[in-house]
Amino acid sequence: MNAFKSPEGRDEIGKACRKLYSECPIPAESRFLDTVEFGKTHVLTAGKPESPPLLLLHGTSVNAASWFSYFPDLAKDFHIFALDIPGQPGLSGESRPRLADGSMSRWLETVKAELGLEKFHLCGMSMGSWISLDYGLKHPDSILGMCVLAPGGLAQFRISFFLKSFLPSLQGNSGILKMNRLVHGKVPVLPEFDSFAILISRHFRPLAERIPIFPDKAVKGINFPLLYIGGIEDPLLNTRKSAGRLRRLLPDAQIRELDGIAHVILDESPAIRAFLTGIPGNSTQSSTNSQSTSTSAVGPATE
């Protein structure tokens, strides 16, 4: 399914993405990978190439800029690859792979090959966390360590969220901003992200596929280091239920339940950095494949 309502809308979102990426808080490289059946995949790369590789996956209806608050801290110890997931409002291919049929794991395996990686750390937000877990279950030998923020797949979405968001969904731009506040909770929303959310609502088709729930047997089989982070006030997901299920099925997982935090989690880079750097074998070096199709430098707007 094409994620955009029109070619003009796709181009307008693309223009806004490029502006967002030009304001990356640290110097980064903008690249496109040839991911075959999934079209081109856009990736922002930062940090030292000799550092361990860390792939970052954003949530639905956003893009790689979701990780900007994490870039400065994580780039100290990792070679960062922040991906635009296909079928989302970034710069990657506009056709949306399905979750339930394993397409996202095939896409990430293709990304791995294009980047020339053998093993890597993987972090996801929301839907990106689900993709991370699904990939890790299918390709555990590729994962050095994984962090999942507000992950889907461990508990059903709250019906109350859809009830709370129904009326705002009918209120145009003001309703979009209300839903933005609901998802962010106490986390401040920058004006540029409010503007981007309105642009997305105008030109982008949100994900309609239900996020599959991982069965107990699959969760019990996770054999790589895992850090779970969730906000107690998350209006979409029941963090206590998800964390409780992990404690029961995967006692070795590290779990952080954050009081006063909703679905958007922006200040956990110290915890992620400490967790990943503490994993044995973290000195594994990354390599990149020269077959990527194009590169260009992006960085802070002040440079």
Image (cartoon, helix red, strand yellow):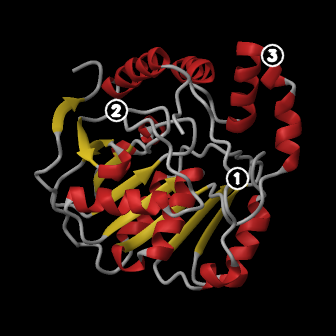
Q: Amino acid at mark 1?
A: Arg
- Secondary structure of the residue carrying tag 1 is loop
- Secondary structure of the residue carrying tag 2 is loop
Q: Amino acid at mark 2?
A: Pro
Q: Position of residue 94 (x, y in %)?
A: 44, 35
- Secondary structure of the residue carrying tag 3 is loop
| Residue depth check, mark 2 versus mark 3: number of the one nearer the observer | 3
Label 1 Cα neighbours within 10 Å, binned few <14 / some 14-19 / many ≥20: few
Please tell me which of labels 1 and 3 falls first in the chain. Answer: 3
Which residue lies at the image location 33% right of the left edge and 43% below the top edge? 39
Asked if disc 2 and disc 3 are in contact, CB closer than 8 Å, the reply is: no
Q: Position of residue 285 (x, y in %)?
A: 19, 67
Which residue lies at the image location 75% right of the left edge and 54% below the top edge? 237
Please tell me which of labels 2 and 1 falls first in the chain. Answer: 2
Q: Amino acid at mark 3?
A: Gln
Label 2 Cα neighbours within 10 Å, binned few <14 / some 14-19 / many ≥20: some
Read off the residue under disc 1. Answer: 210
| Residue depth check, mark 1 versus mark 3: number of the one nearer the observer | 1
Read off the residue under disc 3. Answer: 171
Read off the residue under disc 2. Answer: 25
Q: Position of residue 102 (x, y in %)?
A: 51, 64
The residues tagged by marks 2 and 3 sit, at their Cα atoms, a distance apart of 33 Å
160 and 1: which is toward the camera: 1
Rendered position, 44 above or below 237: above
The residues tagged by marks 1 and 3 sit, at their Cα atoms, a distance apart of 24 Å
Label 3 Cα neighbours within 10 Å, binned few <14 / some 14-19 / many ≥20: few
Rendered position, 112 above or below 206: below
| Residue depth check, mark 2 versus mark 1: number of the one nearer the observer | 1
